[in-house]
Image: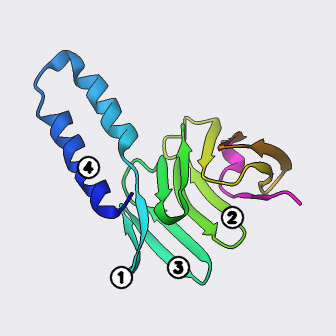
Amino acid sequence: MNAVASIEDWGRLLDWTWNRRSLPHYGHRLKVWSTKLRPDVVNDPSFGWIGYGCRVENEANEVRVFPKDGVRKRLLIVPDKLQVILRRGEIKSLTFDRRTSAVSLQIEDTTGMVKIVSVTIEGLEPGEYLLRTENSERRTRGSEKLGFEVPVEEANSLHISRAE
């Protein structure tokens, strides 16, 4: 997937969503539109790291992403095929260490209604991972997807790394 394909997909999605006039299916199309919306991070050979719908900072082997898309539930780092998906809460920032595959997340709840944050990470190597918050530490296994839930109070500082 490259940035152009992502932009073309966005255009097709908007065309499909907003040019249909049948009201009974409006809610379904809006749901499809909102679940496809996500910031993409690419590494362009000419311009370096670029974020579509997000701000990107790159230092040596770390990529920091700050979503600005309004929804902040999904994020994809294209070169590493790393995708983070939230069912509740919003991604405030993500740091990905490309050398160790460690992920640090800051998640917030702007609604005040979220009690538990459900996180899915795709693109990590299969194995056992250590999930650390400010108050706890636990191990979890993942294959193609790594999924876990944490209380929203602990989601403001999550660190996921390979267990040793």
Among numbered discs 2 and 1, the one appearing first in the sequence: 1
Q: Earlier in the sequence, mark 3 or mark 2?
A: 3
Residue at the extreme right:
164
Q: Secondary structure at mark 3?
A: strand
Q: Which residue is mark 3?
A: 58
Mark-to-mark CA distance, 3 and 2 = 15 Å
The stretch in magenta equals 151-164
Direction from residue 29 to residue 154 in the image, left or right? right
Residue 38 percent location from the top left of the image: 40, 51
* Residue at x 70% of width, y 40% of height: 148
Q: Which mark is residue 101?
A: 2
Q: Position of residue 92 (x, y in %)?
A: 53, 58
User: Observer-nearest residue: 86 or 89?
Assistant: 86
SS category of the residue bearing label 1: loop
Disc 1, disc 3: CB below 8 Å? no
Name which quarter of the figure residue 113 lies in. top right
Residue 124 is left or right of residue 134, and the answer is left
